[in-house]
Image: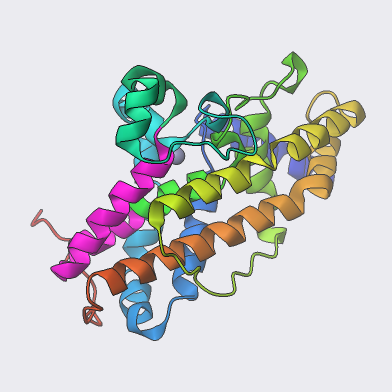
Amino acid sequence: MRRIGLVSTIAVFLLSTGLCWSWGPESHELITSKAISILPKELKTFYELNSRYIVPMSNLPDDWRETYKAQVGPEHYIDLDLLDAPPFKKLVTDRASAEKRFGRQKLLEAGMLPWTIAERYEKLVRAMRKTDTVEIVVQSAILAHYVGDAHVPFHNTKYYDGKTPKQKGIHFRWEENLASLALRRLDVRPVKPQQIRNVLKSAFGWCISSYKLVDAILAADDEARSIDPNHGFKYYQSLQRKTGSILAGRLKSASEALGGLYVAAWKEAGKPNLPAKHAPLFWGH
Ligand SMILES: [Zn+2]
């Protein structure tokens, strides 16, 4: 019974999501709500009161991507291995220098994720400086999305959908299907916000940590496929057994990174008093 239930869950899920590459909505929402749960009290009241907006709106950038793929697609990933070789000691992290070295077109091909995080962070700092609560809510949500993406291994490599023809589809199977199926059973317990001194450096660091996990997931995919070549119940059971802890670890790190960015933005803005009320997200209609 349970087995039939799970298989049909997979089928319904596949039909309902279509092919869109990113953490599923549940994972982005989990990262965002866990980040809020570990904030210090000066931020927590405001963020908790507005989590009803911030948490679901963390999926907004994926909606934009559906409509404006050419313009905003590269914001969601960075293929580090197009810009340097592991262990990425020679990565050019300054955007202007990177553009000069690789050219704008190649950079767009490789992706813009860490720079997008840094830009969104600056927007959050500006919103905090003005204590513009609507803008704080919006920018916090958007920032959450990209920090989440940086923690998906397959958003950081040119092998974003496997290295061999048989691995094709692993991107979607791991970040959407496995995450969605495993989420309720995963123990994701962030401890405290990360200390962030340099946002861009941290963002590249998150991407590199994600990259390092790609081979382990691909090996787990090969093993799971040898048990169940049709990607059914036994495939996902095996994939979860082998990579469930990677998944939980990525979600935990993403929450701690995001919490760290909220705290860093608040400090950089001069520790404004965030009001203990809902942001007026009401446009009069
Ligand atoms: Zn995304």
Q: Nearer the viewer, residue 121 or 43?
A: 121
**Residue 54 covered by magenta stretch:** no
Quick check: 116 left or right of 88? left
Relative to 3, say whether 68 is above or below. above
Q: Position of residue 41 (x, y in %)?
A: 39, 85
Q: Is residue 91 left or right of residue 70?
A: right
Q: Residue furthest bottom?
A: 41
- Residue 139 within the magenta-colored segment of the rendering: yes
| Quarter of the rendering containing residue 106 | top left
At horizontal 49% and vertical 46% (from top left) the residue drawn is 204
Q: Residue furthest right?
A: 227
Residue at horizontal 49 percent and vertical 71 percent from the top = 193
- Image region (quadrant) for ligand 1: top left
What's drawn in magenta, residue-wise?
112-141
Is residue 122 visible in the rendered structure shown here?
Answer: yes
Is residue 64 at all visible to an observer of this figure?
no
